[in-house]
């Protein structure tokens, strides 16, 4: 507003104001093309203002092709490569996981993301470069703003603006050129006083401290706010949701328990029901001997397992070496030795049956020892028996 | 109406209404001057809002309120308020997401692809369609955000160094989707804003009043225009940037719906796991998007009396594209059936027979009649040029395309491999509220956009007028 008034009243304080440029308006694109060609021969600092991009104006002004496409290419490609490097680092170094049987680094699956990153960074950086670097925006303090010249060139006229900063600039010559080319409304445009002095810059202390205040404030608020937020409804639904605790009352089920019994006939993993359960123990033991054999190999690990289990569960009565020397001091009937002829002649399965089902006063150890542990104990008993009656070949 | 210091325009009567006038670069009924164009395009922004606009805004804003309430319910109580459940865990939210993303694609197609093909008829509707893209993507984006269950943690979708020490799975189509949709939104926004800057500058220079409202308006336009000066030293780069953005947006728009289709196609579900999905989805997106553009253009044209800006010729060209893409979509439906038969895969065959004749047959046949049969009306020039008929058909196409996504998503999930795991999907009231409300959001944003921003690119439409070209240079155009 003030500038328009200023321009109307410029004659009074002409001396106090610095000239920015001499401007003239043209009616048709043809006229402005001729005028631009003429101006380009004499001046470097001049500009053409048109309501739309006039084709051929770049040639008339002697400007080459815009190089901005190279920025797009460079930034898009380098960001794509950076993203590729980042994905490679994540997939190979920091977080290597096999997804759907694919190799750690599988390029075809990254193509969509690489493409999107290229387009995103290319497009965004091009627009930012155009407006903030090439055009020097935001700039609402330019002398041309709010002049009748700008109001017409943004609507329907074509303007030529010869700037005073050009070394060849001379007000009379410039006016002559505009008149010769048929310009109308030839008018000088002046700097506003405030503009002639330096305006606010990005390094101004007030701006910098404002920025610092905003950064500290926003990050502090975000940190404390977010840390509080996760404990508030509804954000805490996942951490405080109702759940069934094993020994607690639960209204979902009829019997009011959280922990439900398995369905009848359920078989636990690795535990097949033992089939040789008969009233006649002798017969059952013989049946087991007929149909079962030790599935475990005689390896060091198996003997280790057998020894651990024998020492912790069997040795209290049978003694560490199976000799029946119970450590219970007669408080419990001591079992017969495992080195007897009878036990030596039993098959592995016969011993296994006794451990599983019990015999006489010995109870079943099926609950204390898993199937594999029982077979390992059988191997260990065999080793104990052999240790008291070694064969000559054992010396080798 | 006439502001001092502004020349009068032949295009306007003394009371500000528009005389006989049409902007159609290829079909100019009355050649307007550059000033006439500025006046006519700025008029809805500068004139007082009409009663029709207020009524339309009231209706769409009420629907927007409905959506806000439903989002509030979904936010507070969680996604259990929707009908999604096993086996149909992807239901309305994903259907609505794909539907709205598809709507957006027409905008980019008009602004970028038709720009590269130098289709001048696009100028009257390009800005509008670009705006529509942005609003449609905004409507779409909310659905997957809430579908994650914890919409306040969208940052988990992004690969960022976090205390959990995990990274996103770069091989997952859902992660591709995050990248594609956010890129699409950002680039569309930049494209749109780049085009708007000279027009904001024009509006800035037209706002000359001394009252407070005018001063505020002028400041807003000054900030938005960034101080654009119409300098040819800027235009030179600006035009190149616009071309680059169009060039980048063209493969982008194809990639976005391709990746959206990957969400389905990369899974192993019968009816989803097909290679035809990317082209089929892209064609469907353009189809539904153009139908939505026609619906909204006819509507806006009525609300703002823009018959002079949005001409029947333009709408007719839109209808031709609807006919083309509708036929492609119909071909894809047929081809899906053919491949199911030709593959010899029993489960695949069952899926398609189940779609057409199973419990969701009603949805399938709504889709077929709306998408395949109704656009065939546009073979006839008379129907193609009739505004009421195109309005009805475009609404049919929108309904049909929504049902296409419904059929794909729900029928495949409801009955997959094992009959023991089959199920049924029942949407809840919140689901319907969100669907209806998203239209409220879309139309509210559109109405505000048309009222407060130039709905036709002032600078661009001037550049394609015959008088705009310098005679000794422009022989080749």
Image: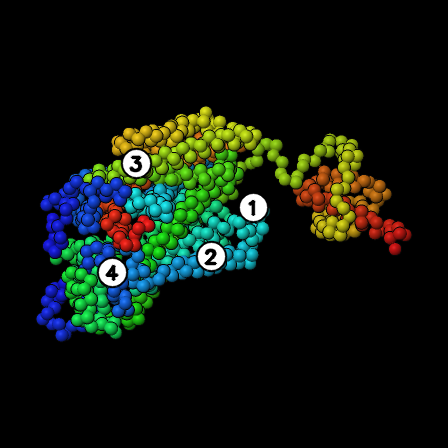
* Contact between labelled residues 4 and 1, with CB atoms less than 8 Å apart: no
Residue A100 is labelled as 1
Of label 2 and label 1, which has the lower sequence position?
2
Q: Which mark is residue B316?
A: 3
Asked whether residue B295 appears in the rendered view, the answer is: yes
Q: Chain of mark 3?
A: B
Residues at discs 2 and 1 both on one chain = yes
**Left or right of B431, for residue A317:** right
Task: Tell me, yes or no, whether the two marked residues, 2 and 1, touch with CB atoms within 8 Å.
Answer: no
Extreme-top residue of the structure: B357
Task: Determine the secondary structure under disc 3.
Answer: helix
The residue that label 4 is drawn on is: A34
Residue A70 in the image: state x and y as whole percent. 41, 60
The tally of labels here is 4
Q: Are marks 1 and 3 in contact (CB under 8 Å)?
A: no
Label 2, label 3: how far apart the Cα atoms are: 41 Å
Q: Chain of mark 2?
A: A
Residue B241, position in %: x, y? 35, 56
Q: CA distance from mark 1 to mark 4?
A: 67 Å
- Numbered tag placed on residue A80 in the rendering: 2
Measure the alpha-carbon separation of dots 2 and 1: 25 Å
**In the displayed structure, would residue B238 be above or below residue B60?**
below
Q: Is residue B310 left or right of residue A306?
A: left
Q: Nearer the observer, disc 1 or disc 4?
A: 4
Of labels 2 and 3, the one closer to you = 3
Q: Nearer the viewer, residue B206 or B452?
A: B206
| Image position, residue A65 (x, y; %) | 36, 60
Q: Do callouts 3 and 4 point to residues on the same chain? A: no
Mark sitting earlier along the chain (2/4) = 4
């Amino acid at each position: 507003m003030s500038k328009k008034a200023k321009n109307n009243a410029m004659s009074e304080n002409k001396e106090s104001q610095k000239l920015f440029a001499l401007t003239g308006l043209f009616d048709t694109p043809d006229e402005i093309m001729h005028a631009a060609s003429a101006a380009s021969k004499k001046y470097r600092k001049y500009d053409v203002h048109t309501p739309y991009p006039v084709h051929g104006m770049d040639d008339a002004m002697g400007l080459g092709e815009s190089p901005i496409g190279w920025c797009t290419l460079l930034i898009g490609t380098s960001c794509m490569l950076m993203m590729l490097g980042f994905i490679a680092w994540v997939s190979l170094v920091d977080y290597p996981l096999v997804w759907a049987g694919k190799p750690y680094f599988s390029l075809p699956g990254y193509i969509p993301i690489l493409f999107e990153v290229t387009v995103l960074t290319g497009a965004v950086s091009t627009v930012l470069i155009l407006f903030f670097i090439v055009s020097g925006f935001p700039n609402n303090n330019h002398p041309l703003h709010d002049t009748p010249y700008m109001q017409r060139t943004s609507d329907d006229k074509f303007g030529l603006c010869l700037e005073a900063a050009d070394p060849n600039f001379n007000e009379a010559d410039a006016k002559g050129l505009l008149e010769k080319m048929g310009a109308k409304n030839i008018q000088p445009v002046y700097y506003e006083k405030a503009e002639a002095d330096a305006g606010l810059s990005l390094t101004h202390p007030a701006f910098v401290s404002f920025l610092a205040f905003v950064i500290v404030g926003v990050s502090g608020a975000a940190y404390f706010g977010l840390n509080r937020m996760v404990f508030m409804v509804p954000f805490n639904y996942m951490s405080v949701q109702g759940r069934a605790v094993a020994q607690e009352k639960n209204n979902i089920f009829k019997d009011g328990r959280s922990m439900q019994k398995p369905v009848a006939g359920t078989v636990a993993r690795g535990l097949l029901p033992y089939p040789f359960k008969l009233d006649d123990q002798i017969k059952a033991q013989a049946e087991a001997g007929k149909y079962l054999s030790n599935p475990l190999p005689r390896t060091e690990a198996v003997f280790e397992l057998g020894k651990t289990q024998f020492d912790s569960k069997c040795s209290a009565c049978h003694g560490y070496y199976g000799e029946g020397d119970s450590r219970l001091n007669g408080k419990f009937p001591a079992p017969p030795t495992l080195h007897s002829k009878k036990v030596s002649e039993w098959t592995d399965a016969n011993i296994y049956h006794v451990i599983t089902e019990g015999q006489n006063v010995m109870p079943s150890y099926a609950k204390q020892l898993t199937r594999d542990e029982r077979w390992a104990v059988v191997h260990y008993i065999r080793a104990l028996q052999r240790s008291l009656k070694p064969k000559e070949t054992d010396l080798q | 109406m006439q502001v001092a210091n502004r020349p009068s325009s032949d295009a306007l009567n003394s009371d500000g209404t528009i005389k006989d006038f049409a902007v159609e670069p290829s079909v100019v009924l009355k050649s307007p001057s550059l000033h006439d164009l500025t006046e006519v395009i700025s008029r809805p922004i500068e004139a007082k809002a009409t009663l029709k606009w207020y009524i339309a805004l009231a209706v769409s804003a009420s629907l927007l309120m409905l959506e806000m309430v439903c989002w509030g319910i979904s936010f507070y109580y969680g996604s259990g308020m929707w009908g999604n459940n096993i086996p149909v865990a992807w239901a309305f939210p994903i259907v609505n997401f794909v539907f709205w993303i598809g709507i957006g694609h027409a905008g980019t197609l008009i602004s970028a692809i038709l720009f590269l093909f130098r289709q001048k008829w696009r100028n009257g509707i390009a800005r509008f369609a670009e705006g529509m893209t942005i609003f449609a993507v905004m409507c779409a984006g909310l659905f997957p955000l809430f579908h994650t269950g914890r919409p306040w943690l969208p940052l988990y979708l992004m690969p960022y160094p976090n205390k959990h020490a995990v990274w996103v799975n770069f091989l997952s189509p859902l992660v591709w989707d995050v990248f594609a949709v956010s890129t699409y939104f950002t680039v569309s926004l930049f494209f749109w804003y780049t085009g708007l800057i000279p027009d904001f500058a024009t509006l800035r220079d037209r706002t000359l009043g001394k009252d407070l409202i005018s001063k505020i308006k002028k400041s807003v336009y000054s900030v938005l225009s960034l101080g654009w000066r119409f300098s040819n030293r800027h235009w030179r780069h600006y035009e190149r940037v616009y071309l680059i953005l169009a060039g980048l947006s063209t493969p982008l728009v194809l990639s976005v719906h391709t990746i959206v289709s990957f969400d389905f196609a990369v899974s192993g579900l019968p009816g989803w796991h097909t290679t035809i999905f990317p082209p089929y989805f892209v064609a469907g997106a353009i189809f539904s998007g153009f139908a939505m553009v026609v619906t909204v253009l006819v509507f806006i044209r009525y609300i703002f009396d823009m018959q002079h800006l949005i001409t029947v010729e333009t709408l007719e060209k839109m209808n031709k594209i609807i006919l083309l893409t509708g036929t492609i979509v119909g071909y894809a439906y047929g081809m899906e059936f053919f491949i199911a038969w030709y593959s010899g895969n029993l489960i695949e065959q069952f899926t398609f027979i189940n779609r057409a004749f199973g419990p969701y047959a009603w949805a399938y046949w709504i889709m077929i009649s709306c998408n395949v049969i109704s656009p065939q009306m546009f073979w006839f020039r008379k129907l193609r040029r009739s505004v009421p008929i195109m309005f009805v058909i475009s609404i049919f196409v929108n309904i049909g395309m929504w049902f296409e996504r419904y059929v794909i998503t729900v029928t495949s999930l409801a009955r997959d491999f094992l009959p023991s795991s089959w199920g049924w999907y029942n949407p809840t009231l919140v689901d319907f509220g969100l669907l209806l409300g998203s239209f409220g959001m879309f139309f509210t944003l559109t109405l505000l956009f048309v009222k407060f921003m130039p709905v036709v690119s002032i600078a661009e439409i001037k550049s394609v007028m015959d008088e705009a070209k310098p005679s000794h240079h422009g022989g080749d155009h």
